[in-house]
Amino acid sequence: MSQSETFFNYRNLITGIDTKIPLKNGKLVPAINFDNAATTPPFNYVMERINSFSPYYSSIHRGNGFKSKLSSDAYEMSRNIICNFVHCNPQKNTVIYVNNTTGAINKLSYIFNSLYRNSIILSTRMEHHSNDLPWRSKFKVDYVEVDELGKLNLSDLKYKLRKHHGRVKLVCVTGASNVTGYKNPIYKIAQIAHRYGAEILVDGAQLVPHYPIYMEQSSKEESIDYLAFSAHKMYAPFGIGVLIGPKSTFSNAPPEYSGGGTIKVVTDDYVLWDDPPGKNEAGTPNVLGVTALVSSIKILNKLSLNSIDKREKSICNYALDKMLQLPNIIIYGDTNPNCDKVAILPFNIKGMHHETTARLLSDLSGISVRSGCFCAHPYVQRLLKLSPEEINYFKTHFNDFRPGIVRLSFGLYNTYDEVDTLIDTLKKITRNIR
């Protein structure tokens, strides 16, 4: 059995896996998607569940019709499924549905602003903008630095926590980088944060679909306080995201959005908010999005996240080994195959702009990748080792050919044969580099 054939059953799980697309020369070829860190294709099972549930879909809460009761039960029962998936205590925590990870972190930033307005938020130089910008607009934010390879500097984390003398209320950290794929030691970070009186938020967008996460640890100090993630990165692209955190936090703060579904009583001069999560889910909920997410979790559990992690890293390391043998390829970050990361591989071709590389991969072989700074500009600037003068230049010349990186991100359904196509295409491209 060839290496690619071991992935056969996994590919059968994915919608549109054999879709053919036109190359620039007009030839039709199977699409190759190495852009899974942005969005994954849906599981077939997710689409089947959406179609089978749709005839019973109805507005939830307070409806007395059969469909409304059925939809309401499915929606509310889903919260326990989410808690079980990320191993948190549903008695202590609440699961709040949002549009995506960005919405989740913005929601939490408003909650913290109402509770801890004069505190300090500690983010990192590795973060996606969604775990940086919402905090900048409301708090004084300090940042944990990264080392020469782009890995988080835990010594700097401790230094920053000591420096602020207990004023840091929250440490915001990505579970896995969307640029380099590095998995951060989130339980160790939690332990350090709690030692200095801070809580921890994990941006799980890149970690949750690929690797098990245990919010509740045997040691309370190592437990995760808040977690955010998105379904569209875990084979369920129907616009749902999740924010999980202690019920006490959301009980003590007013919602950032008010309106239908957020209250118990309203009179001419009085408002009594609902308990969380109801008070935090204004408007008509995305029941179909929740159905899709729960369906994807069922498949991910069946496959085992540990097995998925092993499979994806095998593909990533196969690509890494082949690319290290090519001339004019620059790979960013740690190239040790034993590096603890999700299956993301950032690179450039020496002498070629990242957008040109991405376009040629698509034009020549139907390979989808992402290029740019991946909503993590400060991190990419460090990986590229840009000077302060270069960074300042692009503050005002942002329409020029900005520096960036090409990102390969692998899913459970990708194959060694697809990587071989990538390598052959890179050989063609680099052959013309002088």
Image (cartoon, rainbow, N blue to C red):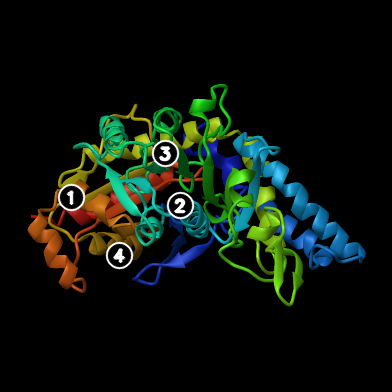
How busy is the neighbourhood of tag 3: few (under 14 within 10 Å), some, or many (20 plus)?
many
Quadrant in which residue 400 is drawn: bottom left
How busy is the neighbourhood of tag 4: few (under 14 within 10 Å), some, or many (20 plus)?
some
Find out whether the residues at labels 4 and 3 contact each other: C-beta distance under 8 Å: no
Q: Residue 312: where, in percent of width, then height?
A: 46, 38
Q: Earlier in the sequence, mark 4 or mark 3?
A: 3
Q: Residue 405: where, in percent of width, then height?
A: 25, 54
Please tell me whether mark 3 sits on a helix, a strand or a loop.
Answer: loop
At 39% from the left and 72% from the top, the residue drawn is 26
> Which label lies toward us, 2 or 4?
2
At 70% from the left and 58% from the top, the residue drawn is 278
- Furthest-front residue in this view: 269
Give how far apart the Cα atoms at labels 1 and 3 are: 21 Å
Q: Earlier in the sequence, mark 2 or mark 3?
A: 2
Residue named by callout 3: 342
- Furthest-top residue in this view: 218
Give how far apart the Cα atoms at labels 4 and 3 are: 25 Å
**Hey, what amino acid is under mark 2?**
Asn
> Which label lies toward us, 1 or 2?
1
Marking on residue 153? none
Q: Answer above or below: position of 78 versus 84.
A: below
Residue named by callout 4: 359
Q: Earlier in the sequence, mark 2 or mark 4?
A: 2
Give how far apart the Cα atoms at labels 2 and 4 are: 17 Å
At 57% from the left and 22% from the top, the residue drawn is 218
> Which label lies toward us, 4 or 1?
1
Give how far apart the Cα atoms at labels 1 and 2 are: 23 Å
> Which label lies toward us, 4 or 3?
3
**Hey, what amino acid is under mark 3?**
Val
Residue named by callout 2: 36
Marking on residue 384? 1
